[in-house]
């Protein structure tokens, strides 16, 4: 009997798909259930933010940064403000720095909650998504109380923050933190030891430390592969050197570790917020920025540790009111490059798991 | 001539009246039988369809409350007739048909699915005397007929002329066929004790207090657990819902169906879920046995309890990957159920069972 | 080591291929000639006291007079940071690919090729990335690029 011939076929995991977070197109070459070759096709969310920023003054660019990575919009604002302040040599008042840290850490927790819910949903457990979003609602309420916005805040501006927090913020924030501490037992009990979860994520998509560093992976992805590197501690910016926080790492670099890593990071963030709330000083929330803001000529690359990894902004100025070049570097850009590396020769279901645990957000990739 | 004895029990009066009416009109006997059985069929069909609608609503409410939200609230008190409205909406949707479909197969797949889902209720005991036909091969017939849905899955996958649908159809066919074996063998382990395959005899063997098969340790609970797992897989529910998972690439066999055809697949899934729960209630939980309340209330209550459990499992667990699913069936469930069967047979031979 | 020590060390090790530049405001900035790029990249990555194995960012810049490609690097093991840039005249906008040195460079260079038109030698995979597949309106990030719906805001 003749040997049956099998053919590889192309499948398009198209821009409209429930599990490609955002509009990402993956052209898969499949051999039956196995994925043999992946080619990401991006650009569906390209809004030319960098080109637009060349045409705007420095303060006018600030709201554009929210849209660069809208899930952690506070962090995006923060990195741009940091870069411009470095260029111009501005000194941000201490209260503003503390407020920035509180907001950025709250945003990190919100982003990790979404990650937790969406990853669980992609693997098949539908309920954690609703639980994660329920907790995130409290954080969003806190943000709305402060700056009036729920998603794109434009709160962290050049030289400080835009508004002071109202009186109800601190008690409500503490209440939220107590509630979230209590919920971790529930959340961990739901999935972490579940045999189905373990068999779906353990050993799937292993990323070695060398590969992670070589491909520019950062943040939770890097730390889950065992590399102990965090921009907040190793290249401190803002006032992170005043806080006492641990940086969790995991050992294996598989999907399970990436999942656990972000839950651990949520706990670390809660401790940072506690310390920040305890030591919040009084004072100005903004330093004096000239109306016609003209930083001196020069270039700077400034980076922060956002929820997804290292987010960077490169600004080149020539002394005028508009930047010559603003380059935005999102961590998901490098992580998406990792997908063809670690997700070949796996089954389709594993590709979905790997994509979800890398926590790739398309606005960071396409800008 | 003796009238055909159907619906002994609560419905006896109605059918006796109908029979008298037909005799008074002067219909010949074969036609009388046809009309009587036709009326019985319509009754069962309508009750089950209403149940399917109820189950859809119930699932949405349970899912919502597990997820800390309300579910349908606007359409009637707590949204009770939401499903009716959804069915009406699906009725008036455009029936999109692809040019390159396989016309006959594409047309008949949802019909086969829908009909196959209802065939099992010919031998299902809804209560004392409330059974359409007390076949002496009752449970065997039900097992055979629940496999018809596999044909409809393959037809749907093939007829859509879509490689996603074909892959999805083949995966679900493989899954259903693989989980048939542990399902049937777990039922066998307890049916050994009844001496008969008739559904009525199976329920009668569990009359009395704590006589249900689930309590007959050690093989009863094991059979119940393995049967439940296999039933969840048969009904294509999470954690075995690869065929209908949206997050997978292959969206499943019903991807190309719209409107009423899709509604038929959807309702057939819920009727299937009711079927496997009803079998569990009959074989393991004592069927219609129970004090004080009418027998059909007990049957319904036990079945709905099983359905509730299936729904809870769906909204809690993640799903298994396709190869893990098949591995679980063949490498774990099949050996366990066979061992259980042998254990039950040995215990029966040596008379070491609890009568 | 702090910034000055790092600067000394780099100047010593680079043997003239990297010259310090004044335009870096916060971190160290060096100028590198296009022909020395691979040598500098390998030295930075492999030297046992430097180990700049993490490529943060590659930006293309159109200053109005020339192109510049700015590389931002970090060392994970020693927690160091530096930048260097390669200046390219408009008529000779070719640069060698560093994707053998840092695999992360592959997509950054692809984007620079697509948006600026700087040719990348030895890359092997330059095709449409962020822009639509049928894009035929030039290189958008260049300063002299124009489009009917791109309105330049007035200088304030």
Image (spheres, coloured by chain):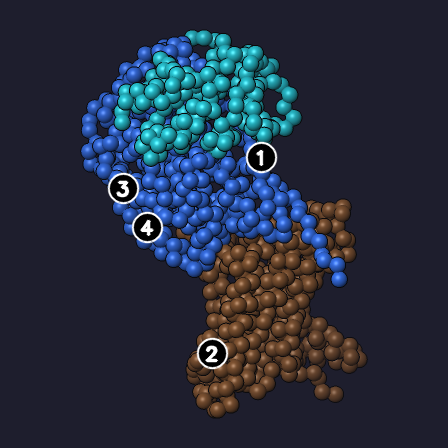
Chain colours: A blue, B brown, C cyan
The mark lying in front, picked from 3 and 4, is 3
Residue density around tag 1, few if under 14, some if 14–19, many if 20 or more, within 10 Å:
some
Which sits earlier in the primary sequence, circle 1 or circle 4?
1
| Labels 3 and 4: the sequence-earlier one | 4
Label 2 sits on residue: B220
Q: Which residue is mark 4?
A: A184
Badge 3 and badge 4 both on one subunit = yes
What is the C-alpha distance between the residues marked 1 and 4? 37 Å
* Residue B260, horizontal then vertical, whole percent: 67, 53
At mark 3, the secondary structure is loop
| Badge 4 element | helix
Q: Is residue B240 left or right of residue C55?
A: right
Coordinates of residue C29 in the picture (x, y in percent): 37, 18
Residue drawn at 52 percent across, 60 percent down? B324
Alpha-carbon distance for marks 3 and 4? 18 Å
The residue to which callout 1 is attached is: A41
Residue A310 lies left or right of residue B139; in this view the side is left
Q: Nearer the viewer, mark 3 or mark 2?
A: 3
The image quadrant of residue A275 is: top left
Contact (Cβ within 8 Å) of mark 3 with mark 4: no
Residue A48 appears in the rendering: yes
Q: Chain of mark 2?
A: B
Between the residue at mark 2 and the residue at mark 4, the CA separation in whole angstroms equals 38 Å
Say whether disc 1 or disc 3 marks the residue closer to the N-terminus: 1
Q: Chain of mark 4?
A: A
Residue placed under numbered mark 3 in the picture: A246
In 3D space, how far apart are the residues under numbered discs 1 and 3 (Cα atoms)? 37 Å
């Amino acid at each position: 009997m003749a040997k049956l011939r099998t053919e590889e076929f192309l499948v398009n995991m198209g821009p409209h798909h429930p599990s490609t977070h955002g509009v990402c197109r993956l052209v898969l070459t499949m051999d039956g259930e196995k994925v043999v070759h992946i080619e990401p096709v991006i650009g569906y969310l390209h809004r030319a933010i960098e080109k637009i920023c060349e045409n705007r003054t420095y303060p006018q660019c600030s709201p554009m940064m929210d849209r660069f990575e809208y899930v952690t919009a506070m962090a995006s604002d923060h990195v741009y403000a940091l870069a411009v302040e470095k260029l111009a040599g501005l000194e941000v008042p201490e209260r503003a720095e503390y407020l920035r840290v509180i907001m950025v850490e709250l945003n990190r927790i919100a982003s990790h909650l979404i990650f937790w819910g969406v990853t669980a949903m992609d693997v098949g457990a539908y309920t954690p998504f609703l639980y994660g979003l329920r907790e995130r609602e409290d954080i969003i309420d806190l943000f709305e109380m402060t700056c009036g916005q729920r998603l794109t805040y434009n709160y962290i501006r050049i030289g400080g923050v835009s508004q002071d927090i109202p009186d109800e913020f601190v008690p409500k924030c503490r209440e939220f933190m107590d509630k979230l501490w209590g919920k971790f037992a529930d959340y961990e009990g739901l999935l972490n030891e579940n045999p189905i979860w373990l068999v779906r994520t353990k050993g799937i998509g292993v990323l070695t430390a060398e590969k992670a560093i070589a491909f520019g992976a950062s943040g939770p992805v890097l730390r889950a592969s065992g590399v102990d590197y965090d921009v907040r501690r190793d290249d401190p910016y803002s006032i992170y050197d005043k806080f006492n926080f641990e940086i969790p790492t995991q050992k294996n670099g598989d999907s399970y570790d990436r999942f656990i890593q972000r839950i651990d990071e949520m706990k670390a963030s809660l401790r940072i917020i506690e310390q920040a709330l305890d030591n919040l000083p009084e004072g100005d929330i903004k330093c004096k920025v000239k109306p016609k803001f003209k930083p001196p000529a020069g270039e700077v690359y400034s980076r922060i540790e956002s929820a997804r990894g290292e987010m960077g902004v490169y600004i080149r100025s020539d002394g005028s009111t508009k930047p010559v070049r603003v380059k935005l570097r999102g961590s998901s850009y490098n992580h998406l490059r990792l997908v063809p590396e670690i997700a070949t020769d796996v089954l389709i279901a594993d590709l979905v798991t790997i994509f979800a645990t890398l926590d790739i957000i398309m606005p960071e990739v396409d800008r | 001539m003796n009238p055909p004895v159907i619906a002994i029990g609560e419905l006896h009066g109605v059918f006796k009246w109908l029979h008298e009416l037909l005799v008074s009109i002067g219909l010949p006997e074969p036609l009388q039988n046809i009309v009587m059985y036709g009326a019985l069929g319509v009754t069962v069909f309508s009750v089950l369809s209403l149940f399917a609608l109820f189950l859809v609503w119930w699932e949405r409410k349970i899912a919502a409350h597990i997820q800390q939200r309300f579910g349908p609230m606007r359409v009637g008190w707590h949204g009770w007739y939401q499903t009716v409205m959804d069915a009406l909406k699906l009725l008036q949707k455009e029936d999109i048909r692809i040019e390159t479909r396989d016309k006959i197969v594409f047309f008949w797949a949802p019909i086969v699915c829908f009909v196959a889902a209802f065939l099992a209720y010919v031998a299902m005991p809804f209560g004392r005397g409330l059974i359409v036909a007390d076949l002496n091969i009752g449970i065997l017939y039900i097992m055979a007929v629940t496999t018809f849905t596999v044909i409809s899955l393959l037809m749907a996958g093939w007829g859509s002329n879509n490689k996603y649908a074909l892959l999805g159809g083949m995966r679900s066919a493989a899954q259903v066929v693989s989980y048939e074996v542990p399902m049937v063998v777990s039922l066998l382990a307890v049916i050994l004790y009844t001496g008969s395959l008739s559904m009525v005899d199976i329920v009668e063997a569990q009359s009395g207090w704590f006589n249900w098969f689930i309590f007959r340790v050690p093989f009863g609970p094991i059979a119940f657990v393995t049967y439940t797992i296999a039933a969840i897989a048969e009904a294509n529910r999470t954690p075995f819902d690869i065929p209908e998972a949206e997050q997978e690439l292959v969206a499943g066999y019903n991807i190309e169906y719209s409107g009423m055809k899709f509604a038929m697949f959807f309702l057939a899934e819920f009727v299937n879920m009711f079927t496997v729960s009803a079998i569990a209630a009959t074989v393991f939980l004592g069927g219609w046995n129970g004090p004080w309340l009418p027998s059909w209330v007990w049957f319904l209550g036990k079945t709905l309890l099983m359905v509730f459990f299936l729904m809870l499992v769906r909204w809690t667990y993640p799903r298994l990957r396709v190869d893990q699913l098949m591995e679980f069936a063949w490498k774990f469930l099949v050996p366990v159920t066979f061992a259980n069967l042998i254990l039950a047979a040995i215990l029966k031979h040596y008379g070491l069972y609890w009568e | 080591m702090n910034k000055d020590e790092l600067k000394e060390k780099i100047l010593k090790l680079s043997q003239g291929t990297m010259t310090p530049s004044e335009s870096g405001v916060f971190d160290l900035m060096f100028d590198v000639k296009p022909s020395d790029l691979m040598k500098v990249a390998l030295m930075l990555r492999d030297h046992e006291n430097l180990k700049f194995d993490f490529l943060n960012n590659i930006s293309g810049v159109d200053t109005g007079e020339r192109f510049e490609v700015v590389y931002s690097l970090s060392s994970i093991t020693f927690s160091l940071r530096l930048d260097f840039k390669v200046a390219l005249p408009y008529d000779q906008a070719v640069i060698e690919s560093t994707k053998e040195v840092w695999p992360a460079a592959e997509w950054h260079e692809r984007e620079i090729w697509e948006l600026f038109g700087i040719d990348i030698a030895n890359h092997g995979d330059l095709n449409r990335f962020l822009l639509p597949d049928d894009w035929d309106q030039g290189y958008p990030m260049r300063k002299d690029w124009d489009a009917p719906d791109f309105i330049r805001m007035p200088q304030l």
